[in-house]
């Protein structure tokens, strides 16, 4: 991997996917890794949001050393295939904190951006809006309580996703600053 690595992490319902989708539109030098998961596709979720696989397929890829990082998150596997970005591109990974910590260990120069929700109420509203049932929403909110202190401690930058446009501006600022530093 010759380009920079940006890891965007944060609890469920924080708006990571929306933020990352916007970054990809606005910065053509970024290349988004597509994760594998054993989670079921949500109703209305794009078929290429993930590479959706069975547990057997996922485990075979673990055994083959095919993941940069992987984890078990609330009963499902999620993993980043060994990235193969086109030349000149910087990699973006949108992953949870355990995976972020694995990436940081292997690539200490990776830039970890941890995104926080403006409030638990707002986070719950966002989780509800994407169609998960109440039990899953509660599970993810409890998981968020665990993830946040770990993510904040690990992060190079912490950004509260209050207003999308402001969050994007801050993220692009972090990305461009990292490029400037890397080229010095
Ligand atoms: P969701 O089920 O909401 O799509 O994802 C659950 C969590 O797993 C989110 O925090 C998401 O960012 C994270 N995630 C998605 N892909 C990966 C991956 O490849 N590796 C890791 N470690 N986490 C991932």
Image (cartoon, grey):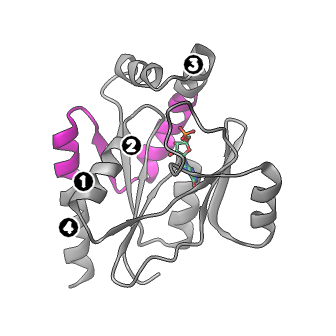
Q: Secondary structure at mark 2?
A: helix
Q: Viewed as shown, does residue 15 lie left or right of 173?
A: right
**Closer to the camera: disc 2 or disc 4?**
2
- Depth check, front residue: 14 or 97: 14
- Depth check, front residue: 149 or 21: 21
* Dot 2 and dot 1 residues touching (CB under 8 Å): no
Q: Is residue 108 above or below residue 45?
A: below
Query: Would you name the residue on which mark 4 appears?
Result: 176
Q: CA distance from mark 4 to mark 3?
A: 37 Å
The x and y percentages for residue 172 are 21, 58
**Residue 163 in magenta?**
yes
Local packing at callout 4 (Cα closer than 10 Å; few below 14, some 14-19, many 20+) is few
Q: CA distance from mark 4 to mark 1?
A: 9 Å
Q: Main secondary structure of the magenta part?
A: helix
Q: Secondary structure at mark 1?
A: helix
Query: Would you name the residue on which mark 2 appears?
Result: 16
Counting residues from the N terminus, which is met first, the one under dot 2 or under dot 4? 2
The x and y percentages for residue 139 are 61, 23
Query: Would you name the residue on which mark 1 appears?
Result: 171
Counting residues from the N terminus, which is met first, the one under dot 3 or under dot 2? 2
Residue depicted at 44% across the width and 42% down the height: 10
Residue 5 falls in which quadrant of the image?
bottom left
Q: Viewed as shown, does residue 169 lie left or right of 80?
A: left
Q: CA distance from mark 2 to mark 1?
A: 11 Å
């Amino acid at each position: 991997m010759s380009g920079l690595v940006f890891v965007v992490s944060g609890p469920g319902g924080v708006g990571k996917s929306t933020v990352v989708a916007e970054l990809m539109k606005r910065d053509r030098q970024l290349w988004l890794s597509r994760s594998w998961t054993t989670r079921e596709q949500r109703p209305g979720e794009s078929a290429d949001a993930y590479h959706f696989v069975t547990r057997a397929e996922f485990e075979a890829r673990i055994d083959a050393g095919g993941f940069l990082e992987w984890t078990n998150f609330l009963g499902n596997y999620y993993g980043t295939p060994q990235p193969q970005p086109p030349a000149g591109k910087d990699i973006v990974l949108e992953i949870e904190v355990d995976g972020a910590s694995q990436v940081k260990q292997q690539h200490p120069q990776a830039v970890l951006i941890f995104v926080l929700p403006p409030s638990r109420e707002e986070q719950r509203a966002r989780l509800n809006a994407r169609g998960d049932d109440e039990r899953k929403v509660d599970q993810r909110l409890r998981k968020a309580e665990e993830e946040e202190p770990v993510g904040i401690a690990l992060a190079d930058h912490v950004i509260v996703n209050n207003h999308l446009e402001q969050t994007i501006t801050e993220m692009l600022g972090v990305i461009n600053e990292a490029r400037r530093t890397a080229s010095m």
